[in-house]
Amino acid sequence: MSTPPKIGIIICSTRQPRVCPQIAQFVLDTIKSKQSTQPQPDTTTTTILFPTPSLNLIDLSTWALPFFNESTIPRQITSPSQYDHEHTRAWSAEITSYSAFIFVVPQYNWGYPAVVKNAIDYLYHEWSGKPAFVVSYGGHGGGKCNRQLREVLEGVNMVVDAGGAGGVELRFPGREVLGKAARGEDIGLNKEEVVFWKEEAVAIGVAYEGLLRVLVEGQAKV
Ligand SMILES: Cc1cc2nc3c(=O)[nH]c(=O)nc-3n(C[C@H](O)[C@H](O)[C@H](O)COP(=O)(O)O)c2cc1C
């Protein structure tokens, strides 16, 4: 692999205001700080030359896809030209350009937001075979949403939780932070020293290593 693979960090909340972009940025910064202190991936376990991936945010709010309105089941599509709509072809091209994904997702009413299911359902082959992990958040970490979304990702044949790391759950540390998150206010993740989610930051690093391992081993489309 010569060109750096692109990894997409998907912002799975679209309401205004919202906290999701702050948390997606926290995930990105956590991985970047790890990249700057450690060679990626672990060169003791592989001799493959692997360029440092680029990390990009994909905001479902910017994409503003309408409710799924294609006539053909995406799994039966053999070329993007067969899609009915320009918005689907654009979304297809966007997802095709990535080698792996990290879904950053709030728990809504014990599940994931409908907007992320809609975005997934538009495509099949563009997701298939690529590694992914889920970072959920909520008053209790969003575990229900995390499990449900991982199951859906398996349904589009993604390689979920490579290395057995499982999903990462970010639990708001108290009512004050939960209230700020709900109001889309700054919850303090951009500080030099973030005072909570230290263990979770380690878990993000472990999940990311698993994802990279899948890319290195060539199990994923690149
Ligand atoms: C429609 C809705 C449903 C929610 N349901 C849950 C829930 O089931 N569990 C939970 O911990 N938090 C729940 N919350 C609180 C969210 O964790 C919190 O509002 C968070 O800021 C949502 O992420 P966002 O700001 O990126 O949309 C819910 C929030 C909304 C808007």
Image (cartoon, rainbow, N blue to C red):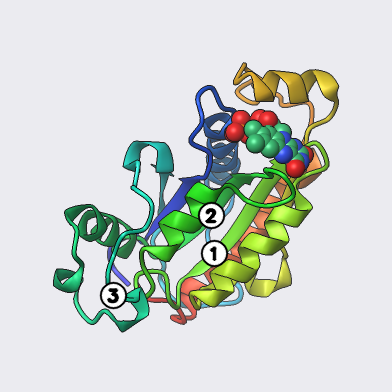
Residue occupied by mark 3: 72
| Among the two numbered marks 2 and 3 on one chain, the one whose residue lies closer to the N terminus | 3
Where residue 132 is drawn, which disc sits there?
1
Q: Residue furthest left?
A: 81
Name the amino acid type tagged 3. Answer: Thr
Q: Are marks 2 and 1 in contact (CB under 8 Å)?
A: yes
The residue carrying mark 2 has its beta carbon less than 8 Å from ligand 1: no
Q: Quadrant of ligand 1?
A: top right
Query: Closer to the observer: label 1 or label 3?
Result: 3
Marks 1 and 3 sit apart, C-alpha to C-alpha, by: 25 Å
| Element carrying mark 1 | strand
| Among the two numbered marks 2 and 1 on one chain, the one whose residue lies closer to the N terminus | 2
Look at 34% across and 60% down and name the residue there: 95
Marks 2 and 3 sit apart, C-alpha to C-alpha, by: 27 Å
Residue occupied by mark 2: 102
Question: Whole-percent x and y of residue 43?
Answer: 55, 69
Look at 57% across and 46% down and name the residue there: 31
Residue 218 location, quadrant: bottom left
Look at 34% across and 76% down and name the residue there: 73
Name the amino acid type tagged 2. Answer: Ile
Question: Whole-percent x and y of residue 159?
Answer: 55, 75
Note whether 83 is above or below 85 in the view shown: below
The residue carrying mark 3 has its beta carbon less than 8 Å from ligand 1: no
Could you say which is closer to the camera, residue 107 or residue 212? 107
Where residue 143 is drawn, which disc sits there?
none
Marks 2 and 1 sit apart, C-alpha to C-alpha, by: 5 Å
Could you say which is closer to the camera, residue 100 or residue 122? 122
| Element carrying mark 2 | strand
Question: Whole-percent x and y of residue 23?
Answer: 60, 35
| Element carrying mark 3 | loop
